[in-house]
Image: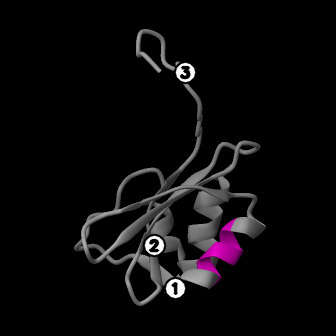
Amino acid sequence: MPGLGQKFLTNAFGATLAAAAGAAVPAAAQQACAPREMVHVRLAMLGERQIGIGLSGPRAMLELWASAASGTWTVLSVSPGGRACVVAAGTDWFSGRGLIAGVPG
């Protein structure tokens, strides 16, 4: 059964991009993009919420969305003009400290 991030890619932007779910999409590859507000609404409908945000140079902001209930996650790259592109999505998201044995939290 595909994760919510994979369903998002399939339903919102086409089956071609679904194969890329769970792995980073190369910059030269076609990306699933839409206005930021539209992508936010769709991710929220799928049970994900924004859990992180950061700058990626002067021309992009990265947003991390995830669902604790389903374990799905999505990374968006947002341009200054408000265009959001899915650059990675996957399953089995975990958050918190000390989740990996031997790795300090």
Question: Going from the N terminus, do you reach mark 1 or mark 2 first?
Answer: 2
Verify CB contact (< 8 Å) between mark 3 and mark 1: no
Question: Going from the N terminus, do you reach mark 3 or mark 2 first?
Answer: 2
**Can you identify the residue that label 1 sits on?**
34
Q: Is residue 8 left or right of residue 26?
A: right
The crowd level at tag 3 (other Cα within 10 Å; few <14, some 14-19, many 20+) is few
Q: Which mark's residue is nearer the viewer, 3 or 2?
A: 3
Q: Residue at x 45, y 60 (%)?
A: 19
- Where in the figure is residue 37, as x and y percent of width and height? 62, 83
Secondary structure at badge 3 equals: loop
- Where in the figure is residue 53, as x and y percent of width and height? 48, 59
Bounds of the magenta segment: 38-43
Give the image quarter of residue 29. bottom left
Question: Going from the N terminus, do you reach mark 3 or mark 1 first?
Answer: 1
Give the image quarter of residue 97. top right
Verify CB contact (< 8 Å) between mark 3 and mark 2: no
Q: Residue at x 39, y 69 (%)?
A: 61
**Can you identify the residue that label 3 sits on?**
99
Within the magenta stretch, is there residue 30?
no
Amino acid at dot 3: Leu
The crowd level at tag 1 (other Cα within 10 Å; few <14, some 14-19, many 20+) is some
Between 28 and 38, the residue placed more toward the observer is 38
Disc 3 to disc 1, how far (Cα)?
34 Å
Q: Residue at x 48, y 11 (%)?
A: 101
Q: Which mark is residue 16?
A: 2
The crowd level at tag 2 (other Cα within 10 Å; few <14, some 14-19, many 20+) is few
Secondary structure at badge 2 equals: helix
Which SS type dominates the magenta stretch?
A: helix
Disc 1 to disc 2, how far (Cα)?
16 Å
Q: Which mark is residue 19?
A: none
Secondary structure at badge 1 equals: strand
